[in-house]
Image (cartoon, rainbow, N blue to C red):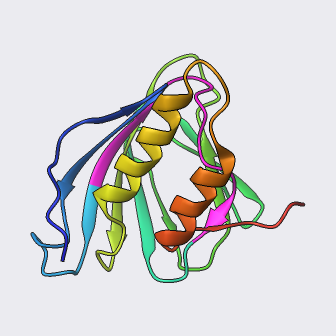
Amino acid sequence: MTKATKTLITTPGVTVQFLVDAEDSAGSTTAFVTTVAPRAMTPPAHSHADWDETLYGIAGTMTYVVDGVKTDIGPGQALCVRRGQVHKFENLTEQDATMLVVSTPGLFHEDYFVSIAEILNAATPGPPDFQALMAVQAAHGVTPAPPR
């Protein structure tokens, strides 16, 4: 099991901070808070076969598309993304959106976000290395959705 540092991970327009890691939960769950600025770059549509994600709105509104169905999640609202469901999210509003994300079992680790942040932060202000981003996703069980 991986012990998270629980430090704030920052990329242009997005922050992630782990609250519970796999070691804390004996592998049963991981939990983190993420804040996404308006129109910040977020991951393309993807799925993960090995864990579910439950999302809970804390502030602002995040738009999720899960298996083609669009849902806005605001404060106090929740959404479960089951294993294998293709999904994406973005902040289409004018204010930051903050979500609590709980993954079960605890297979989605902080080091995924650290690796993504290194790539995105190295690219600022240019475009990121998309091949490197795809390699990180593949290494962590995140599967990009085929183009529609």
State the image coordinates of residue 86 (x, y, percent, origin top left). 68, 68
State the image coordinates of residue 103 (x, y, percent, origin top left). 36, 68
Q: Quadrant of the C terminus?
A: bottom right
**Could one spot residue 60 in this view of the protein?**
no
Compared to residue 30, the image places residue 40 above or below, namely above
Seen from the viewer's position, the closer of residues 80 and 145 is: 145
Compared to residue 83, the image places residue 7 above or below, namely above
Tell me if residue 66 is in the magenta stretch: no
Q: Quadrant of the N terminus?
A: bottom left
Residue placed at 32% from the left, 57% from the top?
Answer: 111
Residue placed at 42% from the left, 56% from the top?
Answer: 55
Seen from the viewer's position, the closer of residues 79 and 113 is: 113
Q: Quadrant of residue 54?
A: bottom left
**Could one spot residue 65 in this view of the protein?**
yes
Residue placed at 9% from the left, 69% from the top?
Answer: 24
Which residues fall within the magenta stretch? 32-47
In the image, 148: left or right of 100? right
